Amino acid sequence: MMPKKELIRIVRTPDGEVGIDLTGKKAGRGAYLCGKVSCFKLAKKSKALDRALKQPVGEPIYDQLENEFIAVEDQFIAAKELTPDDE
């Protein structure tokens, strides 16, 4: 369990598209993963996004998400380090 601001949101929009939502504000059903590629790979292996998004997520979409996840990982970590703690 982690605060939402420390997680990356994967969203299924009302029109059925699946993608990364760094703002956390896109409309649709979301699933949260820690900001590490290893977390994404575990979710891919266990098909966790299929269950969380209540829709089958095919291999091409998982591969696309993995590439996007890798691309935003450094950006996400940098933004998280700049955000002051609420404590």
Image (cartoon, grey):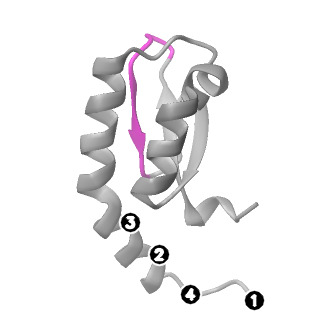
Q: Is residue 26 visible?
A: no
Disc 3, disc 4: CB below 8 Å? no
Where the C terminus falls, by quadrant?
bottom right
Label 4 sits on residue:
84
Where does residue 77 sit, x and y in percent of width and height?
Answer: 40, 72
**Label drawn at residue 80:** 2
Label 1 sits on residue:
87
For badge 3, the amino acid type reads Phe
- CA–CA distance in space, label 3 to label 4: 14 Å
Secondary structure beneath disc 2?
helix
- CA–CA distance in space, label 3 to label 2: 6 Å
Secondary structure beneath disc 1?
loop
For badge 2, the amino acid type reads Lys
For badge 1, the amino acid type reads Glu
Residue displayed at 47% across by 75% down:
80
Disc 3, disc 2: CB below 8 Å? yes
Label 3 sits on residue:
76
Which of label 4 and label 2 is nearer to you? 2
Question: Does the magenta-highlighted stretch encompass residue 57?
Answer: no
Residue displayed at 64% across by 86% down:
85
Please state the extent of the stretch shown in magenta in the rendering.
Answer: 14-22
Residue displayed at 52% across by 43% down:
42
Disc 1, disc 2: CB below 8 Å? no
For badge 4, the amino acid type reads Pro
